[in-house]
Amino acid sequence: MRKAYRLVVCLMALSMMLVLIGQRAEAQSRRDTRGAYFDLPDDFSRSFSSSPKLHSRKRTPHQNPEIEALLYGAIQDRIGAPYRSNGMDDRGYDCSGFVWRVFQEAGIDLSRTSARTLWETLPEASGEEEAEFGTLVFFRGLTHVGIVRDGYSFYHSSTSQGVVRSFYSGYWAERVIGYRRVPLPGNWEVARR
């Protein structure tokens, strides 16, 4: 009886893994305009039908593909890292430590400071910039900050999950208070590694 139970459990686990692999392959075949994976649930876009600014996909002069690539790589290197209060290295990140480290790795000198200070010192993002990758998103109380991925999601260091990608729905949608842009150096050059 135990062997049969173990066999059933193993078969169920194997089938779940195959389903997940298939879903991942399907998600990887769908790419957004920046070339990053865009794997939204089928019913997700319906929840934003009343908010046209979240569908913005235009590129503005502020965007720089080289910087975006460096930011994206720095974020992906940290996905899954644990949350750590005052953390700013791979042992763990708090929200502002995560933002600081990602921009530092992309060659942009951003001060290591609190979400509130970033909010008070950085320029406000335009309506178009609010849905652009690399914009900072701030939340109620100015105690949390993340990096916008697109008009549907953002990256941040969550106290419960560590560095993750979260969607602007439910809990997070109700808490967004605004967006800021990190000014880029006038003659920024791609950092050579």
Image (cartoon, rainbow, N blue to C red):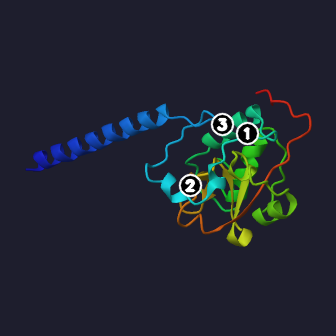
Residue at disc 3, secondary structure: helix
Along the polypeptide, which appears first: circle 1 or circle 3? Answer: 1
Question: Residue 31: x percent and y percent?
Answer: 54, 34
Closest to the camera, between mark 1 and mark 3, is 1
Q: Is residue 92 visible?
A: no
Nearer the observer, 104 or 184: 184
- For the residue carrying disc 2, how many other residues have a C-alpha within 10 Å: few (<14), some (14-19), or many (20+)? some
Work out how far the residue at label 2 is from the one at label 3, CA to CA, in angstroms.
Answer: 17 Å
x and y percent of residue 101 in the render? 73, 47
Q: Is residue 55 left or right of residue 1?
A: right
Q: Which numbered disc, 2 or 3, marks the residue closer to the eye?
A: 2
Which of pointers 1 and 2 indicates the residue nearer the eye? 1
Residue corresponding to mark 3: 73
The image quadrant that residue 102 belongs to is: top right
- The residue singled out by tag 2 in the image is 166
Residue sitting at 59 percent across and 64 percent down?
Answer: 173
Q: Please name the residue that numbered disc 1 is placed on.
A: 59
Gap in Å between the C-alphas at discs 1 and 3?
Answer: 20 Å
Question: Residue 64 occupies which quadrant of the picture?
Answer: top right
Q: Amino acid at mark 2?
A: Ser
Q: Tag 1: residue type? A: Arg
Query: Which badge, 2 or 3, is on the more N-terminal residue?
Result: 3
Residue with the most extreme right position: 186
**View extreme (left): residue:** 1
Q: In the visual, does 119 lie left or right of 29?
A: right
Q: CA distance from mark 1 to mark 2?
A: 22 Å
